[in-house]
Image (cartoon, coloured by chain):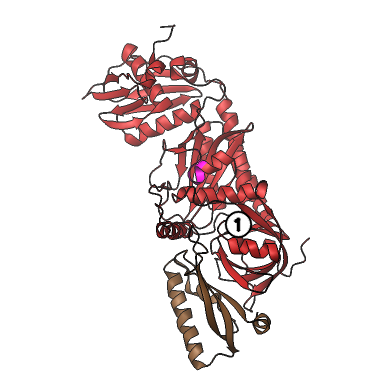
């Protein structure tokens, strides 16, 4: 993944909360690529904690939710967003945001 | 044999659609696209299939560049696996398409979304690599291997083989599904003679039996399994319902009218995975075995074959017992007795053959006609003993020749009467022998119809 980013920088990011089937995709170019600083690590920890809580709402145990990010290698990427799309299944799928 | 470092067979729990999967493609000029798919379907040790529903950009990218990548998640432990894919072809018919379509149609029907899920095809991909994602050690914990099921299947078949009565075989079969395989909530439904619906004959594990409930063929997991004659598994009902809510919202935002009808899933409140297994005998649909679990992913590709085998044996056993027309020697006629006490008012409506006792609905259709016949004959001469044979020969009951479902109909009738404790009972007193049991006298009231059903109630020439 890192090699691809360093190649042409093109990024597609998908987001979908565990509790609902709504989804969005953002596309852009990675403009910064590097190791995460302390602030970024704190964001990650907050996000993992919020993800764990959200998973708990649909009965996913905390250890299962945590395992999805366990042993991950974190990379800091700043992306210049060019466009966004609704990815929710249904007639609006693919609609530009 | 697959040479993947992680065999696809070992990650089947990831391929049940409990947690959606992100699939990534790339255009010819290097622009990636991430899209979410509901099911990555296991085809064999080297191939998977992805549903082609709403993903135009994915399709365009695959036409330009057949490489793709998908991440799948094991819902039981959160392990993730990344699959490098090579797009091979799209199938819009055939067994893989039919299997995926049946499952999607069942989900759509169950959530009131029929017509919204339009499966255009299934994209068949070769799997070039399968790796555990995110480092660490993979902890795939699959169900017991199929070979471990052989002793349990052996016991299931043995228990069924010693049953000599239709009713017993159903009870023993449903209890064995619980004892041996942990399928604690089950409903057995029989196909109606008209071929457009199924009716519940027995259940196991529920607070209320649901006997006599009807399901239309073609709707919901049960109706789709019957219509397509395929096992239908929904691994995560909860997620299917959240998908429904999101799609309904999407329809509203696009200016459409969301579906107003949501077909209720019968049975267990809070069921999170369900399976509907068609019962086939003599190349015909005879019924459906419906299973529910409160846990996600209890039913899916990992046990579809087991479910087919269980359904096949159950269907075969029931077909043999249903066809058994032997009767015990008739008992000496019971002396006519007159029950005392406050009389019951029994009302029979010709329009749909429904019977009410003191205003409480008992049963309708063929069981309703049977009950009315028994009560009328008893009213005429005090008779309480009847035989299956005379029911089969009574043309007014409208039983079809051949597979007449009489045993199933009688079972529904007897269970409904027992459940209601309405003062009328019907017991089996021998093979093919029935006894009507009345605790109090009955006042019979027949409501004739002037409608379309009138012809069905015209007196026969024999009368």
Q: What segment carries the magenta color?
A: B217-223
> Which of the image's four quarters has the C terminus of chain B?
top left
Q: Quadrant of residue B19?
A: bottom right
**Which tint was used for chain B?**
red
B347 sits left or right of B126 in the view: left
Asked if residue B221 lies in the magenta stretch, the reply is: yes
Q: Secondary structure at mark 1?
A: strand
Question: For the view shown, which residue lies furthest in the bottom direction?
Answer: A38
From the top left corner, tell me how far across and down residue B187 is, in percent: 48, 43
In the picture of the structure, the residue carrying the numbered disc 1 is B51
Q: Chain of mark 1?
A: B
Q: Crowding near pointer 1: few (<14 within 10 Å), some, many (20+)?
A: many
Identify the residue shown where x is 47% and y is 88%. A42
B453 and B420: which is toward the camera: B453
From the top left corner, tell me how far across and down residue B173 is, in percent: 54, 41
**Which tint was used for chain A?**
brown
B395 and A85: which is toward the camera: A85
- Position of residue B394 relative to residue A85, above or below, is above
- Position of residue A12 relative to residue B119, above or below, is below
Identify the residue shown where x is 55% and y is 43%. B225
- Is residue B174 visible in the rendered image? The answer is no
From the top left corner, tell me how far across and down residue A17 is, in percent: 47, 70
């Amino acid at each position: 993944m890192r090699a691809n980013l360093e190649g042409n920088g093109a990024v597609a990011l998908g987001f979908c909360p565990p509790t609902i089937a709504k989804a969005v995709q953002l596309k852009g170019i990675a403009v910064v690529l590097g190791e995460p600083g302390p602030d970024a690590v704190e964001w990650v920890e907050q996000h993992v904690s919020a993800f764990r809580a959200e998973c708990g709402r649909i009965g996913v145990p905390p250890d299962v939710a945590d395992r999805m990010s366990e042993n991950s290698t974190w990379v800091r990427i700043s992306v210049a967003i060019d466009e966004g799309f609704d990815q929710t299944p249904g007639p609006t799928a693919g609609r530009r945001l | 044999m697959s040479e993947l470092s992680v065999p696809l067979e070992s990650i089947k729990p990831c391929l049940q659609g409990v947690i959606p999967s992100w699939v990534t493609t790339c255009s010819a000029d290097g622009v990636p696209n991430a899209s979410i798919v509901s099911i990555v379907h296991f085809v064999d040790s080297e191939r998977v299939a992805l549903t082609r529903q709403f993903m135009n950009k994915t399709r365009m990218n695959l036409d330009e560049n057949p490489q793709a990548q998908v991440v799948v998640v094991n819902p039981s432990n959160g392990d993730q696996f990344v699959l490098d894919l090579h797009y091979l072809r799209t199938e819009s018919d055939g067994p893989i398409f039919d299997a995926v379509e049946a499952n999607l149609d069942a989900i759509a029907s169950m959530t009131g979304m029929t017509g919204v899920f339009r499966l255009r095809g299934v994209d068949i991909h070769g799997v070039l690599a399968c790796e555990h994602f995110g480092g660490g050690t993979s902890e795939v914990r699959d169900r017991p291997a199929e070979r471990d099921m052989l002793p349990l299947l052996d016991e299931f078949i043995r228990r069924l083989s010693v049953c000599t009565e239709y009713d017993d075989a159903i009870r023993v079969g449903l209890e064995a599904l619980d004892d041996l395989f942990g399928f604690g909530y089950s409903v057995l439904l029989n196909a109606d003679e008209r071929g457009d619906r199924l009716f519940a004959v027995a259940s196991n594990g529920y607070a209320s039996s649901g006997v006599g409930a009807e399901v239309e063929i073609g709707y919901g997991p049960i109706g789709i399994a019957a219509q397509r004659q395929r096992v239908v598994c929904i691994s995560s009902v909860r997620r299917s319902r959240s998908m429904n809510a999101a799609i309904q919202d999407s329809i509203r935002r696009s200016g459409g009218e969301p579906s107003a009808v949501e077909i209720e899933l019968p049975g267990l409140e809070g069921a999170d995975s369900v399976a509907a297994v068609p019962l086939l005998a003599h190349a015909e649909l005879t019924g459906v075995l419906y299973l529910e679990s409160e846990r996600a992913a209890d039913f899916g590709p990992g046990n579809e074959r087991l479910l087919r085998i269980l359904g096949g044996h159950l269907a075969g056993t029931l077909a043999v017992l249903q066809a058994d027309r032997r009767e015990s020697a008739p008992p000496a006629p019971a002396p006519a007795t007159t029950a005392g006490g406050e009389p019951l008012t029994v009302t029979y409506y010709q329009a749909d053959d429904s019977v009410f006792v003191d205003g409480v609905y008992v049963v309708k259709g063929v069981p309703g006609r049977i009950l009315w016949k028994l009560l009328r004959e008893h009213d005429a001469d005090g008779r309480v003993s009847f035989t299956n044979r005379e029911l089969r020969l009574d043309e007014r009951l409208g039983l079809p020749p051949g597979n007449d479902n009489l045993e199933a109909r009688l079972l529904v009738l007897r269970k409904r009467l027992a459940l209601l404790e309405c003062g009328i009972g019907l017991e089996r007193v021998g093979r093919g022998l029935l006894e009507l049991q009345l605790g109090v006298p009955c006042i019979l009231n027949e409501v004739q119809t002037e409608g379309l059903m009138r012809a069905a109630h015209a007196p026969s020439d024999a009368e």
